[in-house]
Amino acid sequence: MPTFSYPYQMAYSDLGQLGHIPALQVGIQTINGDASPIDIDAYLDSGAMFSLFDGAVLSALNLNVLDGRLRLVSPIRGPAVETRVLPVRLLHEHLGNFDLEIGFSTSQISRNLLGRDFFDRVQIAFREHHLTFYINPTP
Amino acid sequence: MAPLQLLGSENQRPRFFGPCVVEAIGIENGGWLANSAIQQLSKSPLDVWNPPTRRPVVVLQSRRSTEIGWRRAHPEELRRYFGEWVALEGRRIVAHGTSLAQVVREARIEGIAIPYVFRVDDLNDATAIMGL
């Protein structure tokens, strides 16, 4: 029977009306680190093929969303969400830095999602009943 | 059905199987993933006889735990900013507005090098959220 170890345990973020969310508070900055980061909430979403962030985040990093290549994201219902893919760096004080090509929406979305491209870099185990997840910052 | 399968999960656990493997992934005693008969018949004796060294799990707090606690405790105050971006530092809203770039600029003018920003959603108790 395979066993896995996870060095870190984190509680879901209790965001009040939004409920308990498996999320990380991460810094995000330009890929070359030449601009100060901002801290944002990013929900862990293993059902998302790619990470998807609100395009407004790019403006705060002095990046132009339209500089990225087009990627359409198919939601559970309704028309595809247009995103532009740009490389950025995510920062976490314990998990390290992650250079990812994230899709940024060209219109407003409700939340930032860390998808399977992020899950490809770390191992995560959820204990939903305990509103806890475990994380190992290795693939 | 093997006799072991008739036992409660807490009794299925073979005595020779140390507790460290279970605790290493944080599963409570009794929260068994498979019955012990399967484990004893497993072709991976290494797992059975040489369980990995137990390492303590480090419980991490978000570096924004103060801000998250404030968000949870002050929904009425946040309701004033529905649809806006808010920069929150500790228990203080340092900037808010509809432009995230402007909110970040104002937060930095206030001396916040790395502002924590979020948009206040107009949700009610009947709303559940999903990824997309």
Image (cartoon, coloured by chain):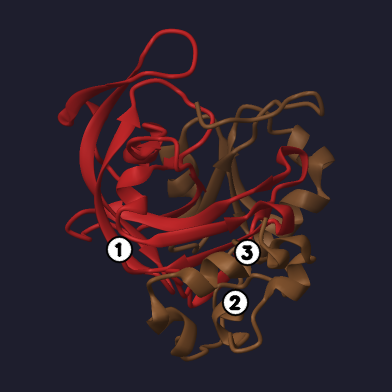
Quarter of the image for the N terminus of chain A: give it: bottom left
Q: Is residue B32 or residue A133 the one in the foreground? A: B32
Foreground label between 1 and 2: 2
The amino acid type of the residue labelled 3 equals Asn
The residue tagged 3 is B35
Same chain? Circles 1 and 2: no
Q: Residue at x 46, y 23 (%)?
A: A108
- Sequence-first disc among 2 and 3: 2
The residue tagged 1 is A139
Q: Is residue B128 left or right of residue B77?
A: left
How far apart, in angstroms, are the residues tagged by discs 1 and 2? 21 Å
Circle 2 packing at 10 Å, graded few (<14), some (14-19), many (20+), is: many
Question: Can you give x and y, in whole percent of width and height, for residue A23 in the image?
Answer: 55, 52
Q: Residue at x 34, y 51 (%)?
A: A118
Q: What is the number of callouts on the image?
A: 3
**B99 over B114 or under it: above or below:** above
Chain letter belonging to callout 3: B
How far apart, in angstroms, are the residues tagged by discs 1 and 3? 29 Å
**B113 over A115 or under it: above or below:** below
Chain coloured brown in the rendered structure: B
Given contact means CB atoms under 8 Å apart, are the residues at marks 2 and 3 in contact? no
The residue tagged 2 is B22
Q: Colour of chain A?
A: red
Question: Can you give x and y, in whole percent of width and height, for residue A50 in the image?
Answer: 32, 37
The amino acid type of the residue labelled 2 equals Val
Callout 2: helix, strand or loop?
A: helix
How far apart, in angstroms, are the residues tagged by discs 2 and 3? 13 Å
Same chain? Circles 1 and 3: no
Question: Can you give x and y, in whole percent of width and height, for residue B64 in the image?
Answer: 59, 63
